[in-house]
Amino acid sequence: METLVKPKTTQKIDLINGVFTASEASDIINSVLKVKINFHKISRLSITEGNDKEECIYDNKRINELINEQHIAKEFFSQARLNGKKLKMRSVIQIEMED
């Protein structure tokens, strides 16, 4: 009798899990945000290449949202630093296959 193995359709990545100084947390979060911003900028560039009239409103909106999150995070980390607080961070990336 042959057993069929069900293919894996989800994946979890435990990306961040620990207690950090404000400076460490700032470095981690800023690095992640920079990667996401650059991803969207490159996507926008590939869409608009050869078409300078293309606005790509969606990508610009997401870039602006991420830049705003950088500013909010900077303020938060400054407050934590001023108050001598450590920061507990946890981030799990959940990936699921879609049809």
Image: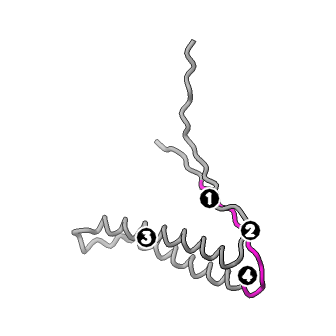
- Check contact, mark 3 vs mark 1: CB within 8 A: no
Q: Which of labels 3 and 1 is toward the front?
A: 1
Q: Amino acid at mark 2?
A: Val
Q: Amino acid at mark 1?
A: Leu
Instruction: Tell whether position 14 is magenta.
Output: no
Instruction: Identify the mark at residue 48; answer none if there is no mark.
Output: none
**Category of crowding for the residue at label 3, using alpha-carbon neighbours closer than 10 angstroms: few (below 14), some (14–19), many (at least 20):** few
Q: Which residues are magenta?
A: 81-93
Q: Amino acid at mark 3?
A: Asn
Instruction: Identify the mark at residue 19; answer none if there is no mark.
Output: 2
Q: Residue at x 37, y 65 (%)?
A: 43
**Category of crowding for the residue at label 4, using alpha-carbon neighbours closer than 10 angstroms: few (below 14), some (14–19), many (at least 20):** some
Instruction: Tell whether position 88 is magenta.
Output: yes
Q: Is residue 23 or residue 77 the one in the foreground?
A: 23
What is the x, y in percent for residue 61?
Answer: 45, 73
Tell me the quarter of the picture where residue 4 sits: top right
